[in-house]
Amino acid sequence: MSFLKIKWVLPLLVVLLVVGCGYPQLSEEEDAVIPTDYTYIIGPGDSVSIFVWGNPDISTTATVRPDGKITIPLAEDLLASGKTPSQLARMMEKELSKYVRDPQVVIMVSGFEGVYSQQVRIIGQLSGGGGFGGSSLSGAGIGSSSGFSGGGGFSGGFGGGGGGFSARAFPYKKDMTLLDLMIQVGGLGQYADGNRASIVRKIDGEVQHFGIRIDDLIDEADLSANVKILPGDIVIIPEAFF
């Protein structure tokens, strides 16, 4: 393992060793802060379809670049990232009005990635992770739902087929729960300690930590452990102590 990888990995190991210790369990009180006005925000990697009524020649589809901008006919380098679809449509109408009389624009989004602040990220002992090993980091990285090395975490090393350290990110879906997230992830790794897992959540601008009980939810079918997931949540799954 290279020095650069060791330098990057060790802080994560420290986090995984201490999570779940002394954090209050996520309760119904914190569970009640789900945003009722949640609206998807466009992010880099999203695909946006632009329909300009009565002008099929300038209707098009564009992918939001890593810098958050898109280019369409008659308009270059429009900032799309950080805007809702309706906000982007109104901005395009203003830009296109220089060339088209009273343009009416509708935006449809697909290929959802979203902005980091709305993504749900999960890191630690996950099913299918490959563990640490001799290969260098590759693939889409933490900001993609494919995780490290095309979804398999760090390739090689300990963890094997039973799961290991990996990290993944998903766009938040309205009314998402912990169970929904586990289904998307595919479950925990063989050496995970789900009842020592935790959620890092920002509430009123303050970062807070809460314990969650994934083992109770999955193994015991304890639905009281099926807490709500919020945009921007970071779920950390530590390795069990043997």
Image (spheres, rainbow, N blue to C red):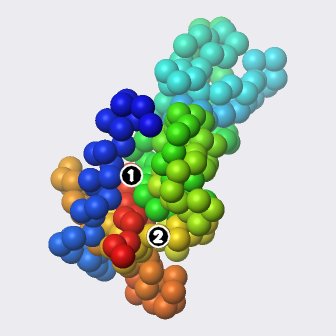
Q: Amino acid at mark 1?
A: Gly
The numbered mark, 1 or 2, whose residue comes first in the sequence reads 2
> Is disc 1 placed on a helix, strand or loop?
loop
Q: Is 3 on the left or on the right of 110, as rendered?
A: left
Q: Residue 96: x, y in percent?
A: 62, 15
- Check the picture and name the quadrant holding the C terminus: bottom left
Q: Is 53 on the left or on the right of 98, as rendered?
A: right
- Determine the residue located farthest toward the right in the rendered image: 56
Q: Residue at x 24, y 62 (%)?
A: 18
Give the residue at mark 1: 232
| Mark in the foreground, 1 or 2 | 2
Q: Residue at x 53, y 21 (%)?
A: 69
Q: Is residue 170 visible?
A: no
Q: CA distance from mark 1 to mark 2?
A: 26 Å
Give the residue at mark 2: 191
> Is disc 2 placed on a helix, strand or loop?
loop
Q: Is residue 125 visible?
A: yes
Q: Residue at x 75, y 24 (%)?
A: 60
Q: Quadrant of residue 240?
A: bottom left
Q: Residue at x 31, y 80 (%)?
A: 28
Q: Is 56 on the left or on the right of 177, as rendered?
A: right
Could you say which is closer to the camera, residue 67 or residue 188?
188
- Check the picture and name the quadrant holding the N terminus: top left
Could you say which is closer to the camera, residue 39 or residue 194?
194
Q: Residue 89: x, y in percent?
A: 58, 31
Q: Residue 133: x, y in percent?
A: 51, 45
Q: Amino acid at mark 2?
A: Tyr
